[in-house]
Amino acid sequence: MSPRTILQVSFRCIGLSLAFPKKRISFLQSLTTGQSVFRTFRMDRKKEPEESQDTSSAGADSAPTAVPVEDTNPSSSTESGQTSSTEPGLLPGETVVREGKAAILFPSANEVFYNPVQEFNRDLTCAVITEFAREQLAQRGVRILVPGERDRVVVRLSEEKNGTEHQEASEQPEKEQQHEEEGGKKEYITASVGERCEQGLRVLEGLAASGLRSVRFALEVPGLKSITANDYSAKAAALIARNAQHNNVSHILQASQRDASMVMYEARGKKERYDVIDLDPYGSPSPFLDAAVQAVSEGGLLCITCTDMAVMAGNSGETCYSKYGSMSIKSKYCHEMALRIILHSLDQRAAVYQRYIEPLLSVSVDFYIRVFVRVKTGQAVVKNSASKHALLYNCVGCGAFHLQRMGKKMSQGKHMKYSAATGPPVGPNCEHCRQRHQLGGPIWAEPIHDITFVQKVLGAVSGNPTRFRTSKRIEGVLSMVTEELRDVPLYYVLDHLSSTVHCNTPPMLQFRSALLHAGYRVSLSHACKNAVKTNAPAGVLWDLIRCWEKSNPVKRERLSETSPAHRILSAEPTLQACFEIREDANPQSRKRHLTRFQENPQANWGPKARAKAGGGISSELEDKRKQFQGKRKKPITDSSQLKSLPCKKLRKFSVGRRCAVLEGEQGLEHHTLCEGSVDICGCVWWSEGQQQTPSGN
């Protein structure tokens, strides 16, 4: 640095210190803090009336900076996104929630619902709607401009051939744009974020709460004509209007206080339909699905969130049937089954109005599921609906499952004949362990993703990583989605396969390699970390487990003759497995160390309490959260803490006894099933450190 530059900096610092005599010392001490200097300087400038006009003309893109107080700690802003403020426009007790480009005024009490953990949900929705708008508006002569997308980077998910295919798929929109520009036959209108586009999309958020999602649409998604943010709560509707004005998007975003179903029912006309409908309710979206499939335009986008995972994952199958018309099963593949249940419900309700769905993206993350489907009209296609759904037969012993299509279709020349399917595909008992079957479903049995569309979203997010705060996680999840087998519903879990026969769990790469050596296809699943999605039948999987058990033997004298483990291991494998690791057994998402399965971000993480009029959270809920937080990390060592529950099979009490088969913490959890006959219960129990055999054996 030259002496002249040093003198200029010194004179500027002296001038600034003279301009603010009250804060001269603190200002000079904070010269080395960088961002703190700018924050202090901007706060003092805002107090001067003659210079306030310069900061008020920032525009919509810089609307979040209108709040004077910022969080200088990056880690805290990433976790919570909330900052307190003394801005004159805020009401007592309000805070500012920052997410994306939006700055939302939010009450401190729990009067309007907000969950910061679902930032990934909102980021992914913005990315999906952007790519959907790019496709739809290209047909209307509109080209959208997304900030930061000029330097797009093509992400290769696989090497050589697969990588070339992905690169061509990502570069295809750019080639089409170049071809259209060279032709010069069609003039395009440019649409930017924060601007109203007359030929753009009409968006409805039926359950908007604070309006954060709608404000982010207005500030981050280009090519929108209007956004209707609706909520039945008067306080929420008033807060939405204030947030729209606070972020300078009132020209695009309109607040509405009505019943969401009525808003959609009144928009059933072809000219009144919405291009995009987003439903993110607290719990189940089932009351709104019938209106949603009618109010979305031809080829429009439906974005549905379900947070009632306890119902959809099998804890209450009868409740799931009443809401979605499908019986859920408590199984290892319950998260993907939940996705297929909501898709089944959407397609079934759309078929009533001669409409059908095309799933674009379906993900199971955190404590909820999220589906993006395109809705179209066609009476001929609706006739295929029965063949797209299937009943599910699940073995209660070994977990093997089979699908039974509800209908079938046969081609007869130019015509298609539809008839009922034949079945069942299984006998009364499982062929592997001779246990009974559970009947679940119907569920959606077709692909749950559109890989071409997912690759477009993935290319846009990876090429513009600074657009979203959760870009790394979006890239990891979508990469796993593109690697999944599209034509294979549901999956097995490797841990469950090995625990069924009580043997050590084989490494995932070795097990995947064995399936590839046997001539079958295999992939992971984004819905479960240890999932094995394969087109191999259940008998092949058990042959691989039998071969693995020979090198990792199990003490068979402890196994009951009627247990699934004994019956499976007693049969000789018909397939000789090769566990030599193959290069193609390791997926590219794992090789690149992408963020595929995120850990819990904070304490008391998960679904938040429902908003109520008075605000606040009940003390009972807080005490319950503290009681169950980290319960799996704290093993039970005192026998008095064991549950005194009856055996599920013998209906007798078993107090303070541990299972001799499952030792340690698993044995403590298994103690309620350990009293009774070995032939029925399948294990041997001990009491007070002495192993005993139940009477009658």
Image (spheres, rainbow, N blue to C red):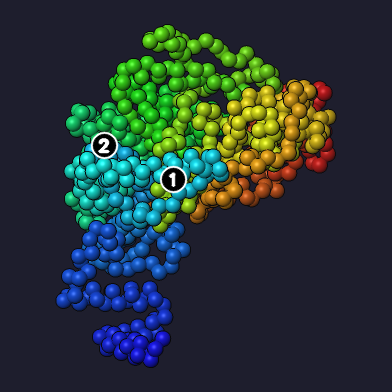
Task: Kindly state the secondary structure of the residue where label 1 is placed.
Answer: helix
Could you say which is closer to the camera, residue 644 or residue 129?
129
Residue plotted at (39% across, 55% down): 151
Numbered tag placed on residue 139 in the rendering:
2
Left or right position of 25 against 428: left
Q: CA distance from mark 2 to mark 1?
A: 22 Å
Mark toward the start of the polypeptide (2 vs 1): 2
Relative to 232, 495 lies left or right:
right
Quadrant containing the C terminus in the rendered view: top right
- Inspect the image, locate mark 1, and give the three-letter code of the amino acid beneath it: Leu
Residue drawn 26% across the image and 42% down it? 183
- SS assignment at label 2: loop
Q: Position of residue 418 (x, y in %)?
A: 42, 10
Please tell me which residue is depicted at 28% across the width and 45% down the height of the picture: 182
Q: Position of residue 681 (x, y in %)?
A: 72, 26
Kindly tell me whether residue 342 is visible in this rendering. Answer: yes
Q: Amino acid at mark 2?
A: Gln
Against 161, residue 563 (above or below) is above
Q: Residue furthest front?
A: 183
- Label 1 CA crowd tier, 10 Å (few <14, some 14–19, many 20+): many
* Residue 276 locus on image (x, y percent): 29, 38
